[in-house]
Image (tube, rainbow, N blue to C red):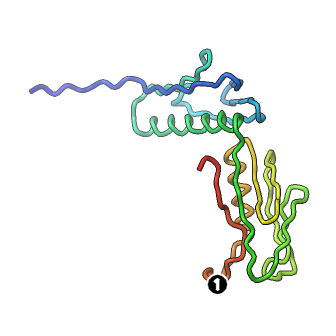
Amino acid sequence: MSTEKIKKTAFKEEIIIPENVELNMEGSLMIVKGPQGSNERRLSDPKIKIKKEDNKLILTSMRYTKKEKRILKTIKSHLNNLIKGVINQYIYTLKICSGHFPMNVSVSNNKVIIKNFFAEKIPREAKILPNVEVKINGDIITVKSVDLELAGQTASNIEQACRITNRDRRIFMDGIYITSKAEK
């Protein structure tokens, strides 16, 4: 029995760009425009080459190792998220739960202001990131954006602003909680 080494060639992945989406590459900056808006992100790694051909993006790695494969798949996921976001916005839904004291939640400037949380005198604030739209309808808060990471971080900021410490969470369940995430 002879032991021959198996040669592994370059690793390739393809992303098909939909017809109603325009993708431009300026060096490592990817600019994606679609019906819902535009998105941009800087994606660069010296081991990964990105080429645009017709309506496809081709990602190649010259080495075939686990590390390069991981990096390539991560870049592919980021690009897919950029493309999906400009077609359909990412939407997070949060619910205002107040059992002990009624909370007043409002949006002003780039902040969500939470008043009367556990009868606190100083209102709590959560930062709204740029290009994110926040609407309050009764006890439901809707967070929308074409960027998945900005929408998720804004929803998390709102949830973390009402974090409770040093109390029994089974009894004191007041707060604002994420009820549905984007793409779930």
Q: Is residue 26 visible?
A: no
State the residue at coordinates (82%, 71%). 124
In percent of the image, x 74 and y 80: which residue is there? Answer: 99
Whether residue 53 appears in this view of the structure is: yes
Q: Badge 1 is on which residue?
A: 171
Residue that lies at the very extreme toward the front in this rendered image: 138
Q: For residue 170, what is the image quadrant? A: bottom right
Q: Residue at x 70, y 26 (%)?
A: 21
- Compared across the picture, whether 61 is left or right of 160 comes to left
Q: Position of residue 91 (x, y in %)?
A: 70, 49
Residue 165 placement, left or right of 102: left
- Residue lying furthest left in this view? 1
Nearest the eye: 144 or 32: 144
Where is 156 relative to 31, above or below?
below
Which amino acid, mark 1?
A: Ile
**What residue is drawn where x is 71% and y is 76%?**
174
Q: Nearer the viewer, residue 59 or 93?
A: 93
- Image-quadrant location for residue 51: top right
